[in-house]
Amino acid sequence: MLPSSGALGSPIELPPACKVGVGLGVAVAVLVSVGVGLGVAVVVLVSVEEGMGSGGSKVFVGVLLGAGVRVGTVAVTGGALSWVGLTGVTPGVDSDGVTVSAGATQAASQKTVSKSSSNVVCFEQDLFIVSSWLGKVLYIALCVAGGQSSARSFLLAASLSQIGLKEKWGGLAPTMEVEMSFPQLYVLGSGTALPSVERDNTSMVVDTPGGLWLVDCGGSAYQKLLRLGLDALQLRGVFLTHSHPDHIYGLPALLFHLKLAGWRSDGPALPIYGNVPTLAMARRVLGAYEIDRWQPPTEWHELPEIEAHGFAEDDDLAWFSTPVSHSRPTLAVKVVAKSGGHVLVYSADTGPCESLLRFAAGADTLLHECTAVEPLAGHSTPQQVGETATQARVGRLVVIHYDPAYLLSTGETLMFIRKGGFGGEVFFAEDGMILSLDARQGDQE
């Protein structure tokens, strides 16, 4: 899926002429490859009949036909793509024929990716993307006859011609498609403490009819809200998970920008929630900038380090916090949508812990950090993320505070999440992604 206007849009729609071109290209390539294959088989059958005997010649011809099918399936999609001239806009393909996104290509230039494990994950994700039973049968048949490289060529051609796919192929991880409804969660940043070209520090905002709620505050929060079409002056609350710089350093700039944008000094105070050491750090940082006159009025709400503490509620949402396991005191957050009862939990920075398991138990959506490749105190590996999601029995898992540019690829990460036992839907958060908190809507069409 390709993003549009701050939301995830509909699949690529090709002009009718292009679809006809794809269809004709596929048909011609199939006829040519089958004709050539049969022609070669007949010639070989006649020429070797006397020397090899009928049994041997049939085996030989079978081998040739198998090879012909493999070559033919690749030629089919290659010819179709060349026919409509779309090869320049399709995802890149690595030496094993595995389609990769731009981010995965960048990651591959920095480290060696395990191809065998990646292929296993690709097969699982391919079947997830193919929506029609006919498409699944064709895909499996092509895997058997021509290998996964050929089958994924079919996926690429089918996506361009809109044949039986949920979404345009764009790498190992599917992208969530939602209709616009409330509440919505917008991912402002999805990366680790070190930003990359594709991902900024993790933060997010919940959009409700009553206003916006910000969770953590990295850099350029005001601009990111503008780019997503959100009115920053509608902020109704800020929740800070902990005091590490990547989660709070943008707060002074955000408050300064809100004042410049027209937040009146006699207007409503902006509530800011967090545990005691986090708010103390945030206030010290603000004090260093000496912007008292150039920020909105604020209310500082110190949250206790107790489990499932309810700290805010309005007509749309109820908010809860719970302590988790990190190198500094940290609070995970839970959002319960009153319309439909959808429950979303964000783990914040944490290693595996019992408090998070209790907090996230039965949640519809779990956004979980995935910062470590090997076990690391205060953070989680992909397998640990899978184990937590499994034990908490969550509906879907969204991997966040993660960056394939520095960590494992999305394919490897998914493989280890599955190894942790989680068999539900897995998505990889990206900057600008939108999640629906309305339980009445499906996550996928």
Image: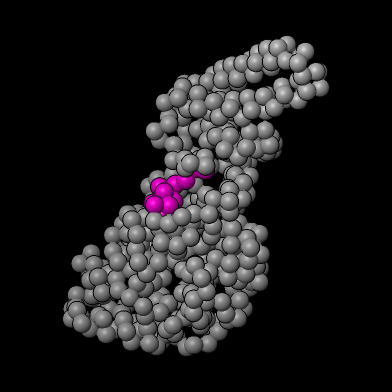
From the viewer's perspective, tell me whether residue 273 is left or right of residue 223: right
Give residue 72's position: percent from left, percent from top.
59, 25
401 vs 239, nearest the viewer = 401
- Total count of labels: 0
107 drawn magenta: yes
View extreme (front): residue = 51
Report whether residue 207 is seen: no
136 vs 233, nearest the viewer = 136
The quarter holding residue 298 reads bottom left
Report whether residue 64 is seen: yes
Give residue 265's position: percent from left, percent from top.
23, 75
- Vertically, is 81 above or below 130? above
The quarter holding residue 198 reads bottom left
121 drawn magenta: no
Rendered residue at 58%/54% (across/down): 117
- Vertically, is 306 above or below 37? below
Give residue 405's position: percent from left, percent from top.
40, 58
425 vs 56, nearest the viewer = 56
From the viewer's perspective, tell me whether residue 172 is left or right of residue 37: left
232 vs 355, nearest the viewer = 355
What sort of colour scheme is used for the picture?
Answer: one colour
Rendered residue at 46%/29% (across/down): 14
Give residue 402's position: percent from left, percent from top.
45, 63
Q: Which residues fall within the magenta stretch?
A: 98-109
Rendered residue at 39%/88% (across/down): 276
Rendered residue at 23%/64% (across/down): 261
- Vertically, is 14 above or below 258? above
From the viewer's perspective, tell me whether residue 190 is left or right of residue 345: left
